[in-house]
Image (tube, grey):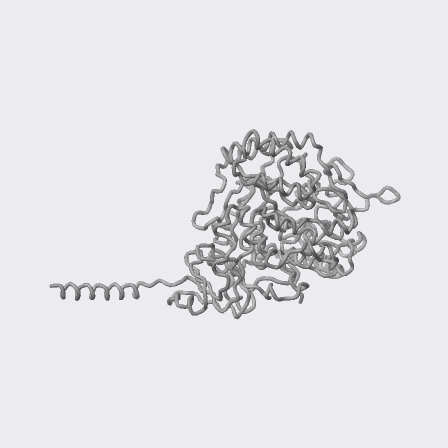
Amino acid sequence: MSRLVIIIAALRIGTLGAQSVESFVGADMIVFNATITTQSLAIPRASAVAVKRGRIYAVGTDAEILGLKDNNTRLIDARGRRLIPGLMDAHVHVLNEKNYNYEVKWEGVPTLKYALQMLSEQAKRTPQGQWVKVIGGWSPYQFSERRHPTIEELKKAVPDRPFIVQYAYNEAFLNESAMKALGVGTSRFPTFPGTVFEKDSQGRYTGIVRANTFTFVTLESMVPLPSYEEQVNGLVYIINNLNRFGVTSVIDAGAAQGYADGHAPLQELIRQNRLNVRFRFIDLQFGGSSSAFVDAEINAITQRSPVSPGENLIPSVAHGHEYEGTGEMLRLALHDHENFDLPAIVIDRDSMLQYIREDVTKLVKRRIPFRMHISYNENITPFLDALEQVNAQTPLDGLRWSIEHAETITPENIERVKRLGGGIALDDKMALHGDAFIKTYSREKALRTPALRRLVESGIPLAMTSDGFRAGPINPWIGISWTVSGKSVSGSEVLAKDNRLTREEALKLWTTGAAWFGGRENDTGKIEPGYLADFTLLSADYFTVPEDQIKNISSVLTVVDGRVVFGKAEYSDLSPKLPEVIPAWSPIKYFGDYYSPK
């Protein structure tokens, strides 16, 4: 009897073993023969990664991971390339790019001569009724000529179409037909404080306007706008451009048109299965007055378009379209801009104290995370004074909040932010505009702006961001290069040697550091089992290339949610096919959306 039991048991074990082999289900994707930066202390080195259902489920050697394949597994040979976690831009303005397909992109262009040639070519194909436009993302210091174009050069390049060439949120160049269309010199032209229209010795407008954010945002709404179809098409190309640099996740930091109406093009991409980036968003609602933003936000997310903080609006994709709170502007009166060509705008202290107490108390009571745009320490101090008063009366109690930009924050205020449980989302403006900062404030101050070494060593939640597409380019490698080399796009030293970061530290600000700002530090930013399957293969090895080549790095393969969303060179066949650019005269069709040497 006992022998029969043993035989039956043995047969059952054999049957289960056969079923196990027969029912083995392998990885959806395996990338092997890679040099992987895992950022995981438990798995510091690996050469292969396996993906299942949009998450990483195994990391190890080629032999270990290739044993997890079946007949349906997509195998990708990395050919020894560096593989890193997907980059997360924790402060970018994607949804403000409605005019993307109408704009000539000067991002990365090395010479002013070629930039003007681009305008000249585009002017010939731009139809009557449309404008030739360059809107932000570039700097005169990136050009070998180290200067702005002159208004005469621009008029020669664009002789018979209205044009606007905008430098960050600092300055714009307009010709006569553009000035007439915008109503320069009349009540139709926006007159926000700080707007100065240059005149020549005879009192005539030169076409050069210097102003702050609100003027330029308004101007953009006054020029011909793309159709809804063109906006959706442009959004496809925006996301493809992000993927090109290895960006797999963004936090949209506020758009001129808020949720939910302003997200219609995004919803269209979701329906088309073209949302190839995880899209978290900070919402900004414009109320009936400049002081009603917070009330308008509360109304929007509780009544008009109900959504909860942290709620994912695409349940099929983790963190696919997720509400992360409000900001970065709580009131017009508290916005200090970030124009390094001019001295800091200092906000009235009493206004800061009153408005922050009023507005933030409402947000804390409703547990709505918030962000506050403050560039200068003179304004950070009263903001923190007010926030400490709020916390004493209505405890923050772990609510996530952050200061955005914070270029000149002092060590004392860094510690105050830390005590209040906040984070700091820096940006890479100094890479693009550091030379201007030197002219305005001095080289000595620039070398310590921001206090990178102090910020990293403080242990505060910290991210580096692009603040694209106006204030800077969306290419993260420009900023990474600056933090490591200390050099701006002109090649000038703008960071002291003891205020720079190691390559490991710089990368973390775009991965594990950025994850905190979306509340996703437990599943984003590492190549580790259980983490999201978001990663990129690089065009060059970030950890070994010379410092002056870091800025030239891009992706050859980008994976989001376990799907290939971008590929070039030997991986181009894996890349999703892009739709034809519309309209047919779009500058994107002819020049692309980031400079590539021919």
Q: In this picture, is 406 found above or below 533?
A: above
State the image coordinates of residue 143 (x, y, percent, origin top left): 74, 59
State the image coordinates of residue 498 (x, y, percent, origin top left): 69, 55
Residue occupying the point 56% across, 68% down: 569
The reply, left or right, for residue 438 in relation to residue 357 is: right
Q: Nearer the viewer, residue 422 or 201?
A: 422
Question: Can you see residue 566?
Answer: no
State the image coordinates of residue 476 (x, y, percent, origin top left): 62, 56
State the image coordinates of residue 324 (x, y, percent, origin top left): 53, 42
Q: Nearer the viewer, residue 259 or 514?
A: 514
The reply, left or right, for residue 478 in relation to residue 368 is: right
- Name the residue furthest left: 1
Quadrant assignment for the N terminus: bottom left
- Residue 209 occupies quadrant: top right
Q: Nearer the viewer, residue 30 or 259?
A: 30
Quadrant assignment for the C terminus: bottom right
Q: Nearer the viewer, residue 189 or 54?
A: 54
Residue occupying the point 63% across, 56% down: 475
Question: Can you see residue 453?
Answer: yes
